[in-house]
Image (spheres, rainbow, N blue to C red):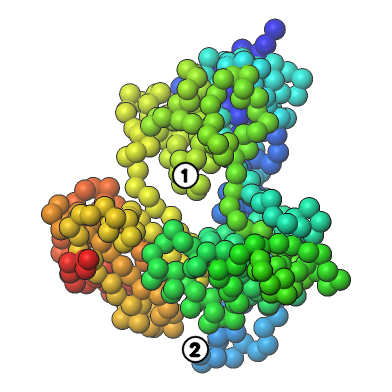
Amino acid sequence: MPHAYDAIIIGTGQAGPPLAARLSDAGWKVAIVERGAFGGTCVNSGCIPTKTLVASAYAAQLARRAGEYGVHAGAVAVDMKRVKARKDAIAGKSREGVEQWMEKLANVTVYRGHARFTSPNTVAVAGESLEAPKVFINVGGRPLVPAMPGVDDAPWLTSSTMMHVDFLPKHLVIVGGSYIGLEFGQMYRRFGSEVTIIEKGPRLIHREDPDVSAAILEILQNEGVHVRLNAECISLRKSATGVVVGVECEQPDKSVSGSHVLLAVGREPNTGDLGLDKAGVKTDRQGYIEVDDELRTNVPGVWALGDCNGKGAFTHTAYNDYEIVAANLLDNDARKVSDRITAYALYIDPPLGRAGMTEAQVRKSGRNALMATRPMTRVGRAVEKGETQGFMKALVDAETKQILGAAILGVTGDEVVHTLLDVMYARAPYTTVTRAMHIHPTVSELLPTLLQDVKPLAR
């Protein structure tokens, strides 16, 4: 006979554990299943470990620039084994915290093993059969390995296997010029590697506006990162000194030789081995579980949260998925995925904070809009810190006066953008910000000034 529960949660990423805690508090009998490391991508190979590495890289870069501030730091050397040990300790503490949290919850039983559906409301794991009227899938995603020529013969790394690197690659070639690739590219250049980023498209991070892409390209090139755009027919070939990455179709001699290659071309969901067919749960062509505005699948009693549903690829979207599900189930609060505003950050230095629509999206919408920009060279706090790369940009609906979107590429941009994001959620006019008195000297104090300068968006 199956073990009976009120709910089964598959996966312990950013949505599963808090949901287990809420259901436990409500008196539900819950089974939570984890086949690997507790905490999901964020804790083990994403946010926490990578931003810990970014912090070490920032320290190395600041030490090299110490002379600009009148400080004599001497020669800078990076000990990669200590860098990795620090990263492992911080991520490990978080992972252990999640696991201990789940083990101590009342009404919650932890199962370790691979979960597979045997029916819409039964799951097999580690020789046990679990049954519940409600099942929540929170299995996350993994780095995508594209079917490019040579990928089966040449050695390569992903954002996950990079977590095991405790040495300095002589020349790291990164295939993919988007968020993950750019963070690792700048990070390892600052550690001391030669770095080449190869991007198939005509510019970096094509989802951003062209001016943002161009500014980020300049930031990376200023630090000695090589960038190869418009790279067609990318291929890999093992060599005596590492890997050769081909970047041209008609001219085979056009290639980049490196000691190591990082594939950073996207991610895919961990849904292929869950037995979803046994449950009748639908997925799209890429394997993402199809859900409605409240994260319900096509099968009654089955929900999908986090990266596996294709509704977001961030820790904060996964956690918001939990909040939406819990609100609807337990609080009689009709929350929806469509209520949230796009928001994320790119953690190069300086970081990019993004909220709402891009300029390109606003233009495509055809609405009457206003826009303002301000270079970070005109932000006093940035000048004082000696970190003036980047710019601010905000877009406003000319009729409603509501803020449509913003991009803050500059020192603390990942924090500053939240000022505008909160006003956007409040649906307040942009004049709410223009009339606010902010603290000097800060980066945020220039947001009122920025918005005071909005002008009609040129067509």
| Nearer to us: label 2 or label 1 | 1
Amino acid tagged 1: Gly
Q: Along the line of sight, which residue is nearer the eye, 90 or 321?
A: 321
Q: Earlier in the sequence, mark 2 or mark 1?
A: 2
**CA separation, marks 2 and 1?**
41 Å
> Would you identify the image quadrant in which residue 185 lies?
bottom right
Amino acid tagged 2: Tyr
Mark 1 lies on a secondary structure that is loop
Q: Is residue 117 visible?
A: yes
Vertical placement of residue 235 versus 65, above or below:
above
Which mark, residue 69?
2
Vertical placement of residue 407 versus 67, above or below:
above
Which mark, residue 312?
1
The residue lying at 72 percent from left, 71 percent from top is 252
On the image, the x and y values in percent for residue 404 come to: 26, 55
The residue lying at 22 percent from left, 66 percent from top is 459
- Assess disc 1: are there few (<14), some (14-19) or many (≥20) residues with their C-alpha within 10 Å of its C-alpha: some
On the image, the x and y values in percent for residue 132 come to: 57, 15
Q: Along the line of sight, which residue is nearer the eye, 234 or 78?
A: 234
Vertical placement of residue 309 versus 350, above or below:
above
Which quadrant of the rendered structure holds the N terminus?
top right
The residue lying at 69 percent from left, 41 percent from top is 37
